Amino acid sequence: MTLSDNQSTGSTPDRARVVRDFSRSELFDRTFREGMDLVEDTAAYLDGEGRRDSKMLSRSAALAYAAESMKLTTRLMQIASWLLVQRAVREDDMTPEAACEPRYRLNDRKIESEPSHAELPIALVEYLVRSEKLFDRTLYLDRRMYLDAQEEQPQNPVLSQHGLLEAAFKI
């Protein structure tokens, strides 16, 4: 049994409505503002105070700083990309069905309990924590809007009856 394209991407008329409704919601407005503000704040920190902070670190801490800042910017770009897709739906630049495509989904992130080095500047650690929390909320929204619908879709009654007949007659 194979899923149709609509089922595999969660792209049903109901799913499209959920995506469009979210893109026009106050929750989206708040999440979008928070995400874009965090991107701007982080960029300003990394280009200014963060650059000065990193020059005062030991060699091993500076390497950890570089690695953590790359993870941070990658995570923020993933969030920003997801938010921009939702905004494109809101502004009718993209259909909700197109937004359901797997290439626009967020991937799970690796959970890390602590920064990679104890000497990292506290400001960087705070940006890391804020970005992780925002990513987790965005990932939750992504899963609720796009993937949970696949689990909620009723099974095709003809295929299920066909499956029962196959089992009964061992076809």
Image (cartoon, grey):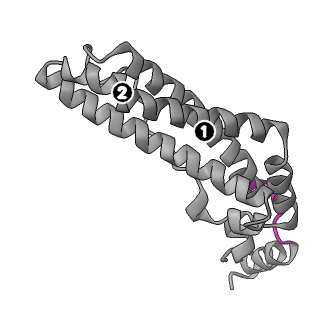
Quarter of the image where one finds residue 167:
bottom right
Q: Element type at marker 2?
A: loop
Q: Compared with residue 110, is residue 51 higher up or lower down, i.e. above or below?
A: above
> What residue is pinned by disc 2?
48
Tell me if 86 is positioned left or right of 43 in this view. Answer: right
Residue 129 locus on image (x, y percent): 48, 23
Q: Compared with residue 142, is residue 153 higher up or lower down, i.e. above or below?
A: below
The stretch of residues the image draws in magenta is 151-156
Mark 2 → mark 1, Cα distance in angstroms: 18 Å
> What residue is pinned by disc 1?
36
Residues marked 2 and 1 touching at CB (< 8 Å) = no
Residue 132 sits inside the magenta stretch:
no
Q: Amino acid at mark 1?
A: Met
**Which one is in front, 151 or 115?**
115
Q: Amino acid at mark 2?
A: Gly
Tell me if 141 is positioned left or right of 68 in this view. Answer: right
Residue at point 83%, 72% (across, down)? 156
Q: Residue furthest left?
A: 59
Does the magenta stretch mainly form a helix, a strand or a loop? loop
Q: How many badges with numbers are in the image?
A: 2
Residue 33 locus on image (x, y percent): 68, 36
Quarter of the image where one finds residue 16:
bottom right
Q: Earlier in the sequence, mark 2 or mark 1?
A: 1
Q: Compared with residue 17, is residue 166 higher up or lower down, i.e. above or below?
A: below
Q: Element type at marker 1?
A: helix
